[in-house]
Amino acid sequence: MLDWQLFFVTLVDMLRWPGIILLISGSIIGMIFGAIPGLSGTTAIVVLIPMTYGMEPSTAMLWLGAAYGAATYGGAIPSILINTPGEAPNAATTIDGFPMSQKGKAGIALGAAATASTLGGVIGLLVTLLLIPLLTKFLMSFSYQEFFMMAFLGLCIIAVLGEGTLIKGLAAGGLGIMLSFIGFDPINSVLRYTFRIEYLWDGIPVVPALFGLLAIGEIMDLIIQEKTIASPQATRSEQGQVWMGVMETFRNIPLVLRSSALGTFIGAIPGVGGTVAGFFAYMQAKKTCKNSETFGQGDVRGVIAPEAANDAKEGGALLPTLAFGIPGSAAMAVFLGALTLHGLDVGQDIFITHLDVVYMLIMAMLGCHMVAAVIGLLVADKVAILTRIRPTLFGPIIFVICLIGSFALRNSMGDAFMTILFGLLGYEMKKFGFSRIALILGLLLGGMAERSFRQVLMSESGIAGFFTRPISLVLFLTILILFISPYVQGYRKRRRKGI
Amino acid sequence: MKTEEKVLTFFLLVIVCLMVVLSFDFRPGARLVPLIIGFCTTILMVSLSIMAISPRFASWYQKLEDKSSKPLITTTEEMSESDRKVDQTRIKKKEISVVGWLLFLTAATYILGFLIAIPLFLFLFLKLWAREGWVLSVCMSGAVLGVVFFIFAYLLHIPLHPGIILG
């Protein structure tokens, strides 16, 4: 059952000073980061993490959760106004959002996006909140075999669905796992791959690696490409239209519910991510709605469906992240880093020992949707101005924040050097289609996978346990299907073409 | 496959191979998983390296998977060969320059410390690379230094690295 007393105590904590200020400021920061293409909710968390070092874990999660939750709606603004998704998950929104802007209906699209995002986010998180008590019982049936398979599955899904080809995704994941072996061996405490460098004894620190791979790699790309963020054709919305968009969303409530359910389900699968959720929701909207021939030409339902799914998936993604320590997306991987940084171990224990932090995170993500909707509806057209900032102006500031943020983790210049090193690697990986997310997951999950695997070997059932335990077997079969499916699809496509 | 991509692939292959070789020195328990993962990753890296050398193998694999890699830096098809070369040379120069700036920031931080390196880097970057005006460069450098000092040194009491000269 839901712990109502703790739930309301956490709610009051969020709504009183300084919680309310952190909620509002986090939501605004998240929206700004989401609205700037190239930056994202993930970057927002990365930048904010160093500022949470002195905070209580639940306060830190409130700020980070609000920033992350609000970013997805922020990302919809440039998708609609300038045909550029602020974040990858907003890509599906551009299909109908930009044509609406071209038709002079940008206000309707922005209003619909704000409302659909809020409703989707609330539905996704409510489902998560209600599933937590059930999940705690379900988790008790998990043993080393299941944890190993979950770690392996998370990695495989990312490799299969991530950037670039399957082989590159798997290679990046493998490299990430290999890097996670640096330092002390988890069972025998043998030093591995340290080259007598004392700094490496504790292994590669995850947060500096994340700073480098995601933030520095991304900003380097923006600066080098000199992408002019705003196009001269950017349309400005009119405030009156925004409310028409709100009403359109309420007229399409069944579509919002369907898209939110789909988004929550996809979000709960580790590693699939919001981009897939957005496109799946768009596809189902096109297939199930009447008069679907207007899709792609500026139909408001083509904005409502992906936006509801994008935000609903955040609730779903929290499930594997908190319950299994398997991040559902890059942002969740950063969240994992933040939780670890504040001394919290995810998995079964967090639902017993730190339930307040879990509730705070969920409520922050709920609250931020309300804040983002209000702000979004009022200033949506003005936020788009931020997309005109040149990357050469904000880029060096992000470099500096990443460097000082890494240093401040442990007051170690080694961490700062590590950030730069991973930044260069991240840029090259992005450039040549190697999945950075797979490498990060390898780095995060490698330790868990090795520890579970060796504990399985020491257990009575041994390797046979992977195939005799039902959940483990199901996970194993899922992994097999994931590996084989791209090749089968390729074979079928070739057969159809007669090659 | 571009030369730069080949270099990256071979570099990653060498790192993984080196880790596999080093694994043999560990105690049996400690080397088991690194060897399993290391061998699998080596096979993947070797396959990528073969693709780097043999375009036939690469196209065969892409047909097999039916999903092509999407390199970030692509030139539009409408570009002429000479335009494409100019564009690639321009990007290459910028890449080297940005890497240089990053290394400068790291070295300056290590030698001079955060409180000198941050405004110095920001001012020089904005003035020389971004070609911003004096006022904006000075104001932004000062503002960022102020925010960094206020948050990290004043609020969070984090002892910022003073640099090897002043430290």
Image (cartoon, coloured by chain):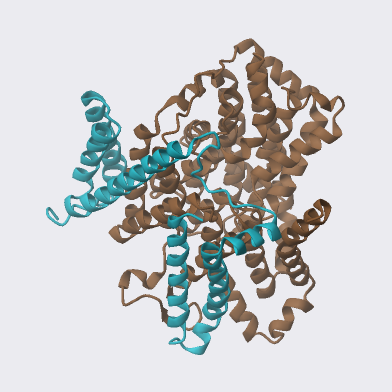
Residue A39 lies left or right of residue A499; in this view the side is left
Q: Is residue A236 above or below residue A171?
A: above
Q: Position of residue A317 (x, y in %)?
A: 65, 50
Q: Quadrant of the C terminus of chain A?
A: bottom right
Q: Position of residue A272 (x, y in %)?
A: 66, 51
Chain coloured brown in this rendering: A
Could you tell me which residue is drawn at 72 percent across and 43 percent down? A263
Q: Is residue A144 above or below residue A165?
A: below
Q: Position of residue A211 (x, y in %)?
A: 42, 51
Q: Position of residue A182 (x, y in %)?
A: 43, 72
Q: Is residue A264 above or below residue A306?
A: below
Quarter assignment of residue A160:
bottom right
Residue A129 vs residue A37, the one in the foreground: A37
Residue A97 lies left or right of residue A494; in this view the side is left
Q: Colour of chain B?
A: cyan
Q: In this rendering, does residue A444 appear at all?
A: no
